[in-house]
Amino acid sequence: MGQRGPGPDGVAVVDKPAGWTSHDVVAKARGLLSTRKVGHSGTLDPDATGVLVLGVGRATRLLTFLSGLDKRYVGEVVLGVATSTLDAGGEVTGTWDMAAVGLDDVRQAATGLTGEILQVPPMVSAKKVAGRRLHELARAGVEVEREAVPVRVDRFTVGEAVAPGVYPVDVECSSGTYVRSLAADLGVALGGGAHLRALRRLAVGAFTIDEAVPLAALGPDRLLPPVEALRGRPRVVVDEATAALVGHGRVLERAALGAEGDGPWAVIDGDGRLLAVYEPHRDGTVKPAVVLAQNM
């Protein structure tokens, strides 16, 4: 039988299990939520666990506001062994004796990989080159030149070794930063090689692992309201008359909306429901980027 009714709308913060691709999680969520309208805000490596933010129903139209958020990860860097995927799932491509490397050395090298840096994306990644995803090319045995891209690493801390040559790391970084590449670059900086294991994403923007739902426990009752997709962004509460204009997607004077700052603005009614997302327009006006007023 087909789906009845409009289906659920909202934001899901899922704790992705290891061995699942982000696409796998979306496919499973569609079954658990009884809707085809599910999308994710950014991929997480199959071997990694942790925060994956989903948009459900009409909230899929809000996923653009969930992309580009800063991230936080923890994991373990294994010195002395490089792999084809830069993590524990790849084939070994090189080994080094790095027994002489100590904690202070690793921490100093990590400092050199903090701040605004240039990073070459790994071949096994979802990044596109000439219209094809790198991991598709890698599976076909093709390696292509990748341009280094600017990323930002706000924090790259290293803890005491948990095993010989294995160091726990905690990374806060901009969207688009590959922690696997940081681990590999750390090994090179120390005169050898390294790879990453046990990667776990603890936060995507203001969405944290503390609120994440195990995938198997996901259901409509575990969804956050659509307005949460604009978490951390300015909100504007409007009266009924303005809400009617917003519902029709009208371009408004900035002052009429009560919009301050650079936007985008989550426009909500007196009950806290998200009506639309507005963004700056020309000549002191604002326009809708997304309108969700109906039935929200």
Image (cartoon, rainbow, N blue to C red):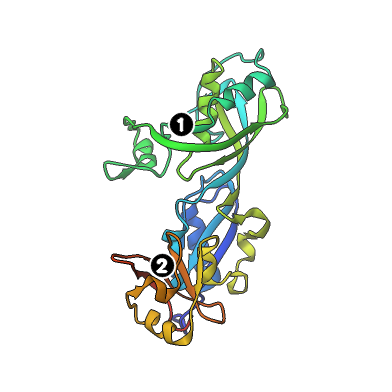
For the residue pair 117 and 34, the one nearer the viewer reads as 117
Task: Write the residue at 42% across / 74% down.
Answer: 257
Residue 184 makes an appearance in the image: yes
Whether residue 180 is situated above or below residue 7 in the rendered picture: above
Q: Which residue is mark 1?
A: 117
Tell me the element at label 2.
helix
- Please name the amino acid that badge 2 sits on: Arg
The quadrant where residue 1 appears = bottom left
Kindly identify the residue that appears in the image at 50 percent across and 29 percent down. Answer: 91
**x 72%, y 26%: residue:** 163
What label does residue 61 carry, if any? 2
Query: Quick one: SS at disc 1?
Result: strand
The answer to whether residue 38 is seen in the rendering is no
Badge 2: residue crowd in 10 Å (few <14, some 14–19, many ≥20): some
Residue 77 in the image, given as x and y percentages of width and height: 61, 30
Name the spot of residue 33 as percent of width and height, x first: 54, 71
Q: Is residue 176 left or right of residue 98?
A: left
Residue 122 picture location, percent across and down:
43, 34
